[in-house]
Image (cartoon, rainbow, N blue to C red):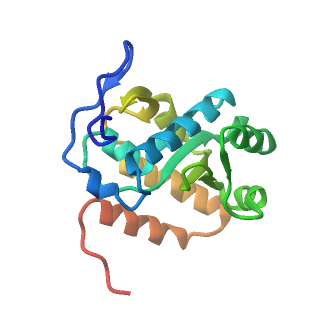
Amino acid sequence: MASPFRPSRGEPGSRSIPALGATTEDVAALSPHPERSILDALQAVERALTEARLDHMVIGGIAVIAQGIPRHTDDVDATVWAESVDLDRLLAVLASNGIEPRIDDAREFALQNQVLLLRHVPTGTPMEISLSWLPFEREALDRAEAVDFAGVRLLVRHGARMNLERIRSVVEQFCTVLEEPERMSLLDEIIARACGAPPQDP
């Protein structure tokens, strides 16, 4: 079976991902059969979000790998456009695909924190589905493109990198509305880390 880090040729109309440098051992912590676990979990979440008819895409480590950057990951992250989400229906659709909350108050937690904490029950793979509201998130979802990831069709963002200054400006407005300007320092730290700057002393 093809490794998820060396995806196979895509179906017509989808983009094939180039072979990458990570090895099966890099994901050995997933389960006794790490490749099948992550692929089964990916297939389940893609099937569920398509069934729910939500604008969505895979993010996080899998999306990074899909862009040709080898890295270790042991979970599945996705995002959906929140404006059209009915959480009760979404949780029901997820459950019908073997994906259930990994905390007792998942619905309430999602309403407060804009993320569903989940687990793919058959494989034990952790999952998170974030709820997107911001303009640059909408833009990313609009740029989502189908790729073949070792035989699993996924939607991931494709195209040029997003403008960090634009993201910072939008989040700054959001923090102002929330009256929580201190959140900007955390965003600046994340941006600095992403750009390779050394961490600042507290």
Instruction: State the residue lying farthest toward the front.
Output: 32
Q: Where is residue 129 in the image (x, y as percent from the top left)?
A: 59, 49
Q: Nearer the viewer, residue 197 or 28?
A: 28
Q: Does 109 appear above or below 36?
A: below
Q: Does 16 appear above or below 66?
A: above
Residue found at x 43% / y 57%: 30
- Side of 27 relative to 95 (left or right): left
Q: Position of residue 58 (x, y in %)?
A: 48, 40
Count the marks: 0
Residue found at x 64% / y 31%: 54
Q: Which of 146 and 39 is in front in this view?
A: 39
- Side of 114 relative to 15 (left or right): right
Q: Quadrant of the C terminus?
A: bottom left
Instruction: State the residue lying farthest toward the right.
Output: 88
Q: Does 10 appear above or below 192?
A: above
Q: Residue 102 occupies which quadrant of the picture?
A: bottom right
Residue found at x 66% / y 38%: 97
Residue found at x 56% / y 43%: 79
- Side of 54 relative to 191 (left or right): right
Q: Position of residue 155 (x, y in %)?
A: 46, 31
Q: Quadrant of the N terminus?
A: top left
Instruction: State the residue lying farthest toward the left.
Output: 21
